[in-house]
Amino acid sequence: MRGRAKVIMAVGIGAAVGAAGSAGAQPTACLSDEFDSAASMAAWSRVEQSEGWNVEPLAHWSVNSPGAGVLSGATGRMVMVPHTVTWYQNYRGPMAYKTVSGDFAITARVRATGRDGVSVPTALFSLAGVMIRTPRVITPATWTPNGENYVFLSVGYGNATPRRFQYEVKTTINGDSQLALSNAPSAEAVLQIVRIGSSVICLRREGAQWIVHARYTRTDLPPTVQAGLVAYTDWTKVSTFTPTAHNTQVLVPGVSDPSPWLAFSPGLRAEFDYARFAVPVVPAWAAGLNMSNPAQVSDGALLTFLGASLDVPSSGCATACSAADVANTDGQTALDGGGPDGVIDNGDFSAFFAAFFAADGDPARMIADLANTDGQTAAEGGGADGAVDNGDFSAFFAAFFVGCP
């Protein structure tokens, strides 16, 4: 989608799932990801892991991992290929997110097709897009229904006849989902969600034109939320499972199936060209106005400071210079509001060892997951494999003593 050079690194779906610092710990814009490096996967959290569900609802998940075939990645993109799964009411789907505080915008260029990468999906409600969500401090054992609170805007296929690309916008409060579908001109769109106080504004770009898609007043959202990317498919099959069955297992042939006569038909490939974070600058004339109310702030007025002005690449943010660059000079990783700083020093040494010897199940331990069991990093065709072992130990020291290029 973008005609500029990329650094290509392959990574498998077992990549480490790390948490980014909140906007209060680092500039919001530095949460942005152009998906030029597979190493950036470690800065994205996955809701299925952070809440302890220990399921993988994606048949494929990668960043900047070119390949061929249905379950493959792509250069310069995050790719999600979901199993049968959804976001609706008490059904919880896959989400790759970062934690953000205060007013912010998330913007992503999204392409949602059938698994062939071209066609309109055939399965009902097969879409991908951007979401903001209230974090849930739960485990599968403490989960209760009616706890989901989020807003998302997505593109793909809903339920139109004849089949055609559509947008879906959804607001969910305490597990009660209200959605609206509308026609989309193609599989690809730039989607944006902006939070300003209690107002949540969803926008889309078609060609060069920005359009205010929907507005909501969400006084229930806490100061810090999850903001990220989602993909879901095959509602017809999903709907035959209870939310508990859906949330606690991967819906593939072989599970306990309440509708064995109905085939599993996941049919979505989602590609994200970038995910950009920014802070909206509200002009003086709009200060104190209700952004959710068109009578107070028109669509045209919103577009003078939302939309295009928030869809810009970040600059001045340090990125990892090698596999050993896991922390800043104070030893703070992304979990602590720090992260790579483009320098290899004692901060990285301390952070790696703290992660390497952290207890199993501690999210901090996955900071040390740099390589596969043979010690091959992403740059060498290996990468994080979901386990911390001697391969990671060897890879860290090999990179540490080489230093930054």
Image (cartoon, grey):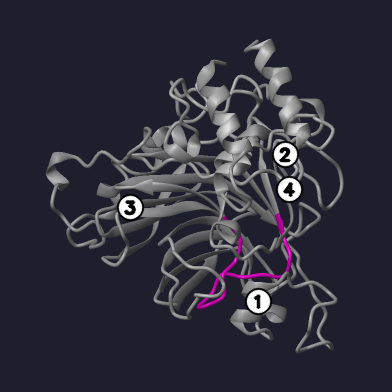
Judged by its main secondary structure, the magenta piece is loop
Residue located beneath label 1 in the image: 246
x and y percentages locating residue 210 in the rendered image: 42, 47
Mark 4 neighbour density, 10 Å: few (under 14) some (14–19) many (20 or more): some
x and y percentages locating residue 120 in the rendered image: 72, 62
Secondary structure beneath dot 4 equals: loop
Confirm or deny contact between disc 4 and disc 1 (CB under 8 A). no
Residue located beneath label 3 in the image: 195
Residue located beneath label 4 in the image: 14
Q: Amino acid at mark 3?
A: Arg
x and y percentages locating residue 402 in the rendered image: 69, 11
Q: Amino acid at mark 2?
A: Ala
CA separation in Å, label 2 and label 4: 7 Å
Mark 1 neighbour density, 10 Å: few (under 14) some (14–19) many (20 or more): many
Query: Which one is closest to the eye, mark 3 or mark 1?
Result: 1
Q: Which label belongs to residue 384?
A: 2
Secondary structure beneath dot 3 equals: strand
Confirm or deny contact between disc 1 and disc 2 (CB under 8 A). no
CA separation in Å, label 3 and label 4: 32 Å
x and y percentages locating residue 320 in the rendered image: 58, 24
Q: Is residue 352 magenta?
A: no
Q: Is residue 196 left or right of residue 235?
A: left
Q: Quadrant of residue 55?
A: bottom right
Q: Which range is magenta?
A: 81-95
Mark 2 neighbour density, 10 Å: few (under 14) some (14–19) many (20 or more): many
Query: Which one is closest to the eye, mark 3 or mark 2?
Result: 2
